[in-house]
Image (cartoon, rainbow, N blue to C red):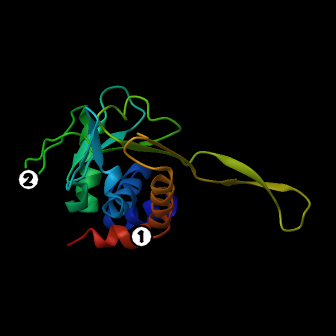
Amino acid sequence: MLEAGRLASEAFDLDVSVLDVLLVAVSATLPSYPSLNATFEEGTHHLHDHQRVALGTGEEGPAIVVNDTAERSFAEIVAVRRNRSDDGENDTSSESGNDGPVTFALATGDTLEGVLEAPTVAGLAIDVSKRRAVPTEEGEGVSLERYLSCSLAYHPRAVGNANARAFLEGVLDAIESAPELILRTYR
């Protein structure tokens, strides 16, 4: 995933973050799991056709909301995130004028605090900063290798465990295909 971000940054001359790559992977996965691109209000599970994703950046202030994520190019996704981080303003405009409820939450780090709020059904936190000790091939020491830590939070009345597990596996598959997915966003 880090490599996909680096390649996209070099190829398209963009200031890419891990969050941008994650958003493309999640956006590609959500259509197969509509129960997670949803809200839950007053005992009713509402599925949404559009994707409106709140991004937690770890910075103070409200989450960045990206409208119509499935319809945006990678450059547009990067621009929305950067507009917020550059000047503190949240540019949530979209060509379709969509201003409905947030349908999914995404954050880097180990928490969705301040990003996943009702009525949103689900959110995913991914931490790429963790490392684990792995024995070297020679067996004489260890090396520290990065690994991906994922935490999926969801409303149990709206999403079942099996569906949540399958969604998480789908996101991990999409992360492996991130360079191809990023290229597909260019129309």
Amino acid identity at mark 2: Ser
Residue at (28, 61) in percent of width and height: 74
Residue 108 in the figure: left or right of residue 9: right
Q: Position of residue 50 (x, y in %)?
A: 20, 54
Q: Is residue 165 above or below residue 83?
A: below
Disc 1 marks which residue? Answer: 179
Outermost residue, right side: 140
Q: Position of residue 109 (x, y in %)?
A: 51, 39
Would you identify the image quadrant in which residue 41 lies?
top left
Q: Position of residue 148 (x, y in %)?
A: 58, 52
Amino acid identity at mark 1: Pro
Residue at (36, 34) in percent of width and height: 115
Q: Is residue 54 above or below residue 161?
A: above
Checking the image for residue 96, the label placed there is 2
Would you identify the image quadrant in which residue 171 lies?
bottom left
Secondary structure of residue under mark 1: helix
Outermost residue, top side: 60
Q: Position of residue 139 (x, y in %)?
A: 90, 63
